[in-house]
Amino acid sequence: MKKLFLIFLICFSLISCWNDTITYKVNCKYSVSYPDTTIIYDTIFNCNYQIYENDTTFIVCTTSYKGTNYIAISPGFNCRANTTAPIRIISYKKIK
């Protein structure tokens, strides 16, 4: 009985250490157009997605929901830099 419990404990500890998320970084240069000025940001975003996602195509785009503008980064559901001012993406690249 003790050996069975020990085997179960070892299997459980190995399964609990398994991580199913993949992390990556994106360097994004974007501008935010406020009413009186435009500010250019150069930011590194930390993003992640689940290992079992079907679509792993790398896309960076702007999106809007109920008057708030976001930078959406795919794969995964990564919405960054939310503001009500318009956002324009100048450049982006995935960092290894």
Image (cartoon, grey):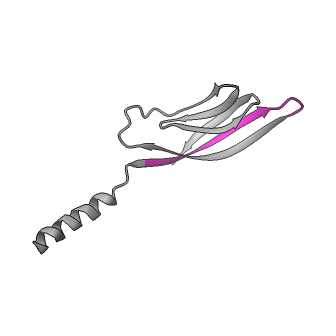
Asked if residue 48 is positioned above or below residue 11 in the image, the reply reads above
Q: Quadrant of residue 13?
A: bottom left
For the N terminus, give its image quadrant.
Answer: bottom left
Q: Quadrant of residue 14?
A: bottom left
Q: x and y percent of residue 62 in the render?
A: 63, 28
Q: Residue at x 66, y 35 (%)?
A: 91
- Predominant secondary structure in magenta? strand
Q: Is residue 57 left or right of residue 91?
A: left
Q: Is residue 17 left or right of residue 22?
A: left
The residue most toward the right is 36
Residue placed most toward the observer, 81 or 40:
81
The residue stretch that appears in magenta: 22-37
Q: x and y percent of residue 40 in the render?
A: 77, 38
In the image, residue 30 lies in the stretch drawn in magenta: yes
Asked if residue 19 is positioned above or below residue 50 in the image, the reply reads below
Q: Is residue 18 left or right of residue 93?
A: left
Q: Quadrant of residue 88?
A: top right
In the image, residue 53 lies in the stretch drawn in magenta: no
Residue placed most toward the observer, 76 or 84:
84
Q: x and y percent of residue 29 in the render?
A: 69, 39
Q: Residue at x 16, y 69 (%)?
A: 5
